[in-house]
């Protein structure tokens, strides 16, 4: 179930006010049908990491498919007043919105793909008024899901093949934050969620144990375990740290023996506080000595990839990780920082006029053109990504230039295989791409990460993956920068 189905209402106003004021400006000046190209991209990998996982495209597609201003939307816009008390949005403009039908071309990088800074995740070409209206909703969808998918991939990497469950709904940023995070976390590699609505909507496996309140509602801890086992004889995982963790494990073992006598087996125990390394080592020893080697040890308690990595180094015997707050809120980086920039305008003679945003900070200078990303491979490994403009094509030497340092260049050998990452999603407003099942997207993430050398995946000071501008595009960009700077000083 996609985003419009979840809300059951028009999402045309899921945007910022300035998108609509600019749209009225384009309409008022007769520019509304001028063809434009915008790109959505980010400038830095999140979490000081070496890669990012693209996510959110399916929801973006669904939103574009259903883009329509309803009479309720238009009535609200008509009610907004200017600073002088006049109707801010003119009736003629509202009539234009009433008749608006999405007609853009959209190309995008598929969900589950490893991506890097400055690479367009989405390219939109069409009437400038339509392109402008899409900036905010596309950013809010792709920014968040890409951020969470990346966090999940890092956590799964740290777990080294152990099971990972998303436990974060209660700490998420509201209901949609919880649902979008569950979806994105699954794309990143998480195996299950505790979020039942996400399980229903996205067909994600659901898992859960019980809370401390279950244990506290009985007179004795062992009585609570026995009661839970009586209700769920084949699916019991006991939370053992309500009073004293090691005593709790002993009582769990006693109930496990009773279960075995009845023909069932305890599935696991959960640790939610204390020294997780020590308690898991002792717990594993106690379970093994009691002849319960297959009982899983699950840990929770504000875990993230760094804590998991530390616990692994300490010899922790945890085999299942319940990750909550620090996954669904992207605790150490609250936003991806994706941007949406105009890159070209079609002139009356049919030629493209490349557009560029200047800045005192070189990292914030946008790249003009109609951009595509060409990824090069050798021996089933990623070796570099070249951003090029389709009208310019790719230079014969396959040479790219570092976006911020023209002295750094890289040429790709002729034996390198390559693939263009942006694929057609809409043509003239009609959908031409079908989103894969979520499980297939998760598998794509796994496959993509397997192509990325481990030096790019490490958490501390990762190696920087090579991304550059195709040589002709680089020259075009810097000529345009010089032209614009000169025009501003004359």
Image (cartoon, rainbow, N blue to C red):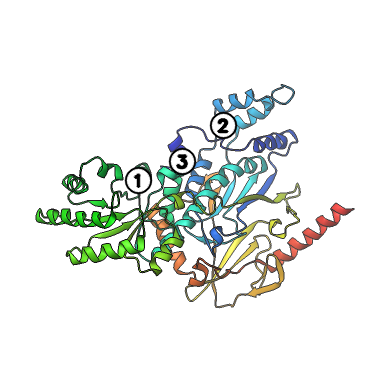
Crowding around mark 1 (Cα neighbors within 10 Å: few <14, some 14 to 19, many 20+) is some
Q: Does residue 297 appear left or right of residue 31 in this picture? A: left
For the residues marked 3 and 2, what is the alpha-carbon distance in whole angstroms? 22 Å
Provide residue 269's location: percent of width, then percent of height: 26, 55
Provide residue 54's location: percent of width, then percent of height: 51, 56
Q: Is residue 297 above or below residue 334?
A: below
Name the residue at 68% across, 47% down.
Answer: 36
Task: Residue under label 3, please give it.
Answer: 176
Q: Which mark is residue 199?
A: 1
Provide residue 330's location: percent of width, then percent of height: 50, 52
Q: Which mark is residue 395?
A: none
For the residues marked 1 and 3, what is the alpha-carbon distance in whole angstroms? 14 Å
For the residues marked 1 and 2, what is the alpha-carbon distance in whole angstroms? 31 Å
Query: Nearer the N terminus, badge 1 or badge 3?
Result: 3
Provide residue 197's location: percent of width, then percent of height: 36, 41
Q: Is residue 9 above or below residue 353?
A: above
Q: Does residue 15 appear left or right of residue 360 in this picture? A: left
């Amino acid at each position: 179930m996609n985003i419009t189905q979840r809300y059951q209402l028009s999402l045309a106003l899921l945007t910022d006010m300035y998108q609509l004021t600019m749209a009225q400006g384009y309409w008022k000046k007769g520019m509304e049908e001028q063809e434009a190209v915008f790109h959505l991209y980010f400038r830095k990998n999140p979490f000081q990491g070496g890669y990012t996982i693209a996510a959110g495209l399916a929801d973006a597609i669904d939103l574009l498919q259903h883009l329509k201003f309803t009479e309720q939307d238009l009535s609200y816009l008509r009610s907004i007043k200017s600073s002088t008390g006049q109707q801010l949005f003119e009736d003629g403009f509202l009539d234009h919105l009433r008749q608006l039908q999405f007609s853009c071309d959209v190309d995008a990088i598929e969900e589950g793909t490893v991506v890097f800074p400055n690479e367009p995740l989405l390219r939109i070409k069409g009437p400038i008024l339509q392109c402008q209206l899409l900036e905010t909703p596309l950013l809010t969808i792709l920014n968040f899901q890409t951020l969470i998918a990346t966090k999940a991939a890092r956590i799964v990497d740290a777990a080294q093949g152990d099971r990972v469950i998303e436990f974060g709904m209660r700490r998420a940023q509201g209901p949609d934050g919880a649902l979008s995070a569950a979806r994105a976390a699954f794309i990143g590699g998480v195996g299950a969620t505790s979020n039942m609505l996400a399980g229903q909507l996205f067909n994600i496996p659901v898992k859960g144990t019980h809370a401390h309140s279950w244990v506290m509602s009985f007179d004795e801890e062992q009585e609570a375990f026995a009661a839970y086992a009586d209700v769920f004889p084949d699916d019991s995982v006991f939370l053992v740290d309500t009073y004293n963790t090691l005593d709790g494990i002993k009582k769990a073992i006693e109930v496990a023996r009773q279960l075995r006598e009845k023909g069932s087996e305890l599935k696991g125990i959960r640790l939610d506080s204390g020294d997780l390394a020590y308690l898991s080592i002792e717990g594993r020893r106690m379970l093994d000595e009691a002849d319960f080697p297959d009982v899983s040890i699950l840990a929770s308690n504000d875990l993230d990839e760094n804590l998991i990595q530390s616990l692994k180094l300490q010899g922790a015997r945890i085999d299942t990780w319940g990750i909550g707050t620090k996954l669904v809120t992207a605790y150490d980086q609250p936003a991806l920082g994706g941007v949406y920039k105009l890159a070209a305008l079609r002139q009356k003679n049919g030629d493209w006029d490349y557009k560029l945003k200047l800045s005192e900070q070189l990292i914030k200078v946008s790249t003009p053109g109609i951009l595509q990303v060409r990824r090069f491979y050798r021996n089933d490994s990623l070796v570099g990504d070249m951003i090029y403009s389709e009208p310019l094509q790719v230079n014969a030497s396959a040479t790219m230039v570092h976006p911020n340092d023209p002295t750094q260049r890289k040429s790709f050998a002729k034996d390198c295989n390559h693939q263009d990452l942006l694929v057609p999603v809409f043509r003239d407003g009609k959908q031409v791409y079908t989103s894969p099942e979520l499980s297939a997207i998760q598998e794509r993430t796994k496959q993509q990460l397997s192509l990325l050398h481990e030096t790019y995946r490490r958490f501390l000071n990762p190696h920087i993956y090579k991304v550059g501008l195709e040589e002709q595009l680089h020259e075009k960009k810097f000529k345009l920068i010089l032209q614009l700077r000169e025009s501003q000083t004359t």
